[in-house]
Amino acid sequence: MKIGVISDTHLDAPTPLLEMVVDKYFKDIDMVLHAGDLHSLEVLDAFVSKEIHLVAGNTDRPEVKKQFPASKLIEVKGFRIGLTHGWGTPLGLEKRAASLFEGIDCLVFGHSHWPVNHCRDGVLFFNPGTFKGGISSLWRKTIGILTIEQDIWGEILRL
C-alpha cells in the first residue's frame, strides 16, 4: 500500500503544480494524508479522485478548522498512524506532536516546513516538508510517500 503525504500547501485553490503532484506522484497511491495548512477548502478539489485524510493547521481558514480536527488517528493495514499539523517552534516539535498519541507506529506532521524521515523508539517520524516552499524551507518544495508492507517506511520527494 502506498500513501501520498503532503503538508503546508498554503493555497487558496488548486494550482497546476498541485494537480501535477496528484497526477504524477500520487497517481498510484491508495490514499492521501494532508498534515495541515491547507488554507482553503477549495484545495481539496485537486484530490477529488483520492481518499484523503487531513487535519487543520495553524494558518488554515476558519471553515477548514471547523470541518477538520487538529489531530487524527488512522489505522491502515494494522498500522496506527497519528496525523497532526504541529505548533510552536520547530525545536521540540516532534515531541509535542507525538504527545498527542499513544501506541502509534508512525507520526505524520507538518508545520516546520522541514522534511523528517527517521525512526525513534519503534515509531516512524515523518514530515513531508512543505509543498509551498518559501524562505523557511530554503525554497525547497517537498512531498512524501509512505509505503506499507510488512513494515512502514517513508520517502521524501523534492519537486
Image (cartoon, rainbow, N blue to C red):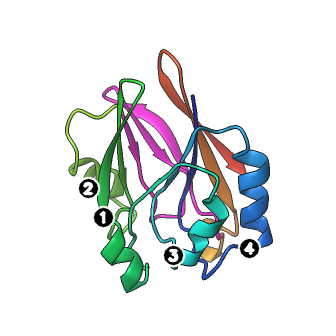
Say if mark 1 contacts mark 2, CB within 8 Å. Answer: no
Percent x, y for residue 6? 57, 56
The kind of residue tagged 1 is: Ala
Q: Could you give the CA–CA distance between mark 3 and mark 2, rounded to whole angstroms?
A: 26 Å
Nearest the eye: 113 or 78:
78
> Of callouts 4 and 2, which one flags the residue occurring earlier in the amino acid sequence?
4
Per the image, the residue denoted by label 1 is 70
Badge 4: residue crowd in 10 Å (few <14, some 14–19, many ≥20): few
Q: Could you give the CA–CA distance between mark 1 and mark 2, rounded to whole angstroms?
A: 13 Å
**The magenta stretch spans which residues?**
106-132
Could you tell me which quadrant the N terminus lies in?
top right
Identify which residue is drawn at 57% across, 57% down. Answer: 129
What's the mark number on residue 96?
2
Per the image, the residue denoted by label 3 is 41
Percent x, y for residue 30? 59, 38
Looking at the image, residue 70 lies above or below residue 22 = below
Percent x, y for residue 60? 43, 78
Secondary structure found at label 1: loop
Per the image, the residue denoted by label 4 is 15
The kind of residue tagged 3 is: Leu
Say if mark 4 contacts mark 3, CB within 8 Å. Answer: no
Q: Could you give the CA–CA distance between mark 3 and mark 1, rounded to whole angstroms?
A: 15 Å
Identify which residue is drawn at 66% across, 56% down. Answer: 142
Nearest the eye: 20 or 49:
49
